[in-house]
Amino acid sequence: MNIFDMTMSALADFLRENGENPAKAPMIFDAVYKQKIRDFSHMGFCGRVTEKLSAIDFVELKTVRRLENESAGKLLLELSDGNFCETVLMRQSFGACVCVSTQVGCNMGCKFCRSGQIKKRRNLSTGEIVGQVLAISREFNCKVYGVSVMGIGEPFDNFDAVRDFCEIITEDKGLAVGRRHVTVSTCGIVPEIYRYADSFRPTGLAISLHAPNDELRNRLMPINKKYPINEVLTAAEYYTNKTHKRVTLEYIMLSGINDDKTHAKELAEIINGRDFYVNLIPYNSTDCGFEKSSPEKISDFCSVLKENGVVATKRKEFGAELNAACGQLLSEYE
Ligand code: SAH
């Protein structure tokens, strides 16, 4: 058993099952995440409790490569079975934000994405996702302000581990990342969007849309053949109504593919007054055969959205020079 796999309630259950007071769970969270103690015998418990807790290990991730510039950092981490995962730090003006991976490889096969070309080998465990946040905080000596679940992998293809991860990092007694500062990004697995909206205290939601019509989205993102745009947006609307949180629609700007003003108009039409927020993402060049749109194209696109009543911003670029595009570090290393 790895402590970093355990939510507060799992830890309380463990204590209860072992005849101990579950009220010790918050103290253990505080010791592990706030005081960074990695030995139960240093937490001030008596020998009997320490003995029972010794069934739980502290398994952290080993850094095998570390890249850094003024505003971004990137780690390649080794998992206990010899697989690797990537995690990224972005130093924003308001604090340090971590982008975590959820799988080794990914099966979604988006045409523009480097990770989609590395077939999924397995899901990451909760502890391995938590371990990425701890590794960033340790290697770059920072307090984590926000977390995006936007690294390699499809989070809703690993739902339970991601949900527990969100519970653990937002725990007040632990890392205490604000719920509003955690965003899970999905390519649009509709049933899981509903499940997420209905889950206990859901965190933020972003949807990788990238196209304003099914014909184009089918070509870029195979998942669209299973869950077309209107089903995805209906699920997103359900999430907003349920949680009163605004959904972000991510839109990568691909030169000559989806970046025309007519696409912007079409996007505004399908949003149709709903309370979504569009984030235009400059494409991070990879060897997938797509080019990034020019800054003028992006500005024009953004203006058309705004003229049509859509709230839209352009995402700040981080780490392009660190090869931070999903999957790039891993594919080079291997
Ligand atoms: N599978 C999830 C989360 C991982 S991808 C999802 O699809 O949302 C995180 C985001 O990065 C997605 O919006 C994805 O489409 C985008 N992305 C993938 N490759 C990219 C690249 N080369 N440049 C910019 N964004 C990219």
Image: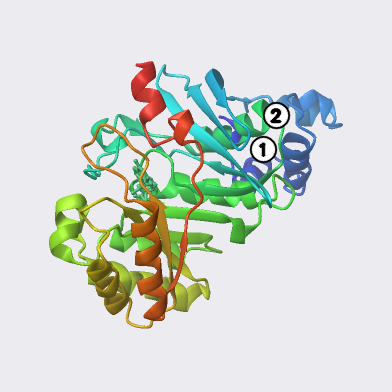
Seen from the viewer's position, the closer of residues 151 and 21 is 151
Question: Mark 1 belongs to which amino acid?
Answer: Asn
**Depicted 222 relative to depicted 308: above or below:** above
Q: Residue at x 77, y 28 (%)?
A: 37
Mark 2 neighbour density, 10 Å: few (under 14) some (14–19) many (20 or more): some
Residue 326: x and y, percent?
38, 36
Residue 275, quarter of the rendered image: bottom left
Residue underneath mark 2? 52
Seen from the viewer's position, the closer of residues 182 and 57 is 182
Can I make out residue 222 in this image?
Answer: no
Seen from the viewer's position, the closer of residues 221 and 166 is 221
Determine which of the numbered discs, if any, sits on residue 171 in the image: none
Residue 324: x and y, percent?
45, 34
**Would you say the residues marked 2 and 1 are in contact, meaning their CB atoms lie under 8 Å apart?**
yes
Mark 1 neighbour density, 10 Å: few (under 14) some (14–19) many (20 or more): few
Question: Mark 2 belongs to which amino acid?
Answer: Lys
Residue 75: x and y, percent?
53, 26
Q: Residue at x 60, y 56 (%)?
A: 181
Can I make out residue 245 in this image?
Answer: yes
The first of marks 2 and 1 along the sequence is: 1
Residue underneath mark 1? 18
Mark 1 sits near ligand 1, with its Cβ under 8 Å away: no
Residue 54: x and y, percent?
68, 24
Q: Residue at x 78, y 36 (%)?
A: 31
Quarter of the image for the C terminus: give it: top left
Secondary element under disc 2, as helix, strand or loop, is: helix
Secondary element under disc 1, as helix, strand or loop, is: loop
Quarter of the image for the N terminus: give it: top right
Residue 285 shown left or right of residue 72 in the figure: left
Cα–Cα span, label 2 and label 1: 7 Å
